[in-house]
Amino acid sequence: MTGRPGDPTDAIIERELERYLVERRMTRRQLLEAVTALGAAVALAPIVAACQNAGLASSAAPSTEASVAPPSTAPSEVAVASATPEPTPVPSPEKELFVYNWDQYIGEDTVSKFQDQTGIQVHYDKFPDADTQMTKLRSDGKGGGYDVSYPASTELPSLISDGVVLKLDKSLIPNVANLRPEWANPAYDPGNAYSVPNYWWTTGFAWDPKKVPGNLTTWDALFDPASHGHIGMLDDQREVFAVAGFKLGLDPNTTDEAQLDQMLNLLEQQKPLLRKYTDDDIGDMTSGNLWISHAWSGDWYQMIADKPNIKYVIPTTGAVRGNDTMVVLSGAPHPIAAQTWINFNLDPQISAGNTNYIGYMGPNAAAEQYIDDAIKGDPRLNPPQAVIDKLVELIFLPPTDLDKYTQRWNALRA
Amino acid sequence: MASPSTPAEAAAAPVVATTSTAGRRPLSERIAGLVFVAPGVVWLAIFFLAPLAIILVVSLGSRDAANHITLAHPSLDNYLRATRPEYLPAFANSLRYAGITTVLSILIGYPIAYWISRYGGSRKVLLLILVMLPFWTSYLIRTYAWMIILRDNGVLNSVLLTTGLISDPIPILNSDFAVILGMTYGFLPFAILPMYVSIDRLDGHLVEAARDLFASGRGAFLHVTLPLTMPGIVAAALLTFIPAIGDYVTPDLLGGAQTTTIAKIIQVLFTSGRDWPYGSALGFLLMVVTLGGTLLALRTLRREVIG
């Protein structure tokens, strides 16, 4: 019968707290007894096991990268790099450089080699996701004080039209000659006027062969009722509609309303089979929630660190190819040092060193001879030309066209 | 400016309504009151009303060819688009999850609050601390913990598999069940606390009087305790339902392909859809609908309290 309406609350709390403190010893013993009675040991075993699983999953990324770069290659690389000087970069009058990139997205010693060779001090900042990157680069409309960053190719058209990136002076970047011919004139930035391609990947699907048997090669596997409730699609509207496009034989970049309705119709039939539109394909595949999932090649590379039996395929009917780029920002305090950096990263050995560390292929023809066989020889990471020819880039869409996708995507999700 | 219309004030209202029955006070006292309330008003104006005004303005705008927001031709087009029937299933999901979560939180929370108040004795504070203990950890982390428990190779499935109750993991995560479980878990403390306050304030003599007048235990509860603690229940319902209807994190992390909520639709418009005016309109509309429901509930509450 405490707490009559008139009582000052503070006094009640103080009184209660005092009692609580006095009786704490007893309470703790009672708690212990209760826990023991519940059979804590039995209950805790699976919890501990599950937590260990979780720990493994979250540490997947670094361990993958470490295994991709055998320590033996590093020393020889250093030796070669110093023995054969590349086309000497134009001496930069600038002594500092501000780089803004993903974490763990560059060769381990790329920065130190650059500093040794050019004498330019590198300030290297990292972002956790592309939204953060774009927000920061657009905060002042000219790059937020950075010199160089690594936007996805799909961001390029708007970054160019909004004046966030600087037109490149190719006389400062002679190593663009190392690019494969098919990268000389990308749709998102004709003639690579404002950007240089960095890494590229594919979007296929990954599956657990224990749950989904067979040698899967087409997108039909993601529409198979046998995997009902365990199929995942990426939580990415353009990628999902592209899958429908490949399956229907339509252009994944179409803006034709009738074709988009056809795609939507197919995806609506698929939706009841799905477990999830996932933004964590790695976690969902390794935890067993998904047996088969629409996935990025780089994500698959992280899945196999935890579950080595997971397979990945670039469907024979066509798939999406994505890439990111290196750009100089329009407000760059050190534009010459920035272009020196880009040129340096196009050096065959430096470029190969980056790829060997993170497992993504670069667009650098001259670098190929220095790339580890484990990456170079895996057709899922380095597909043959016949497969590459079937890959499609998702192009940037102006607002009116993008709306056609967004409206249908939301209708599908709702 | 600060009419009793913000969710924060609406939530605080039930408590205020029962305690302050303000008559006309001397001028000096009223000025002192203004001084005390000023920081709160400024805070709300900067961090609540200003963003709200920005959302309202953006929702009237449109985008030019370069995807920049322009107010050259302000219109209500975005609101017309926002009422499209294809979003109704997502809105229905939001309402359903919020409704079920609210009912479950009250059904589970009321006995807990009642028990703490009536039988908690000297351990009341400890018990209330236990109710609030989950807040010491970030909600996001606790939701991830639920993912670890519910996923196919998670704690729950492991226990069921080792005990031989099932032979294959059952998909629990990414379902209606997982979303409602997660939301009820998350919002339960918000329901327990106001109901506890209301039950604890209840004068026990009234219940005793009812029993003296030959009411059964059940009758005394239904005709005395329950009506007198109704303000607490309504406050609990508001504190649960309002945040639950806009909840984005729980359905997104614990839900699946079949559990999309209106919050997710709005998120898509702001991110991959790059359509802030449309997203703002949909968000504003959701706010208005929630506000309407809140005001309606508050009116009912006032009638209950004042008579």
Image (spheres, rainbow, N blue to C red):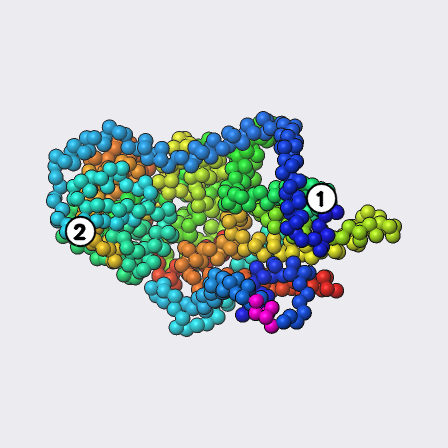
Which residue is denoted by mark 2 in the rendering?
A94
| Residue A346 appearing in the image | no
Q: Secondary structure at mark 2?
A: loop
For the record, the magenta segment spans B27-32
User: Quick check: A319 left or right of B115?
Assistant: left
Which residue does the image show at 59% across and 26% down from the upper left? A42
| Residue B298 lies within the magenta run | no
**Residue depicted at 64% across the width and 46% down the height:** A14
User: Is residue A265 something one can see in this rendering?
Assistant: yes
Q: Position of residue B249 (x, y in %)?
A: 51, 49
Residue situated in front as seen by the camera: A37 or A283? A37
> What x and y, as percent, mark residue A95?
18, 49
Mark 2: give few (<14), some (14-19) or many (20+) Cα within 10 Å: some
Q: Is residue B29 magenta?
A: yes
Amino acid type at image mark 1: Trp
Q: CA distance from mark 2 to mark 1?
A: 72 Å
Name the residue at 52% across, 43% down.
B137
Q: Above or below — where is A27 with respect to A5?
A: above
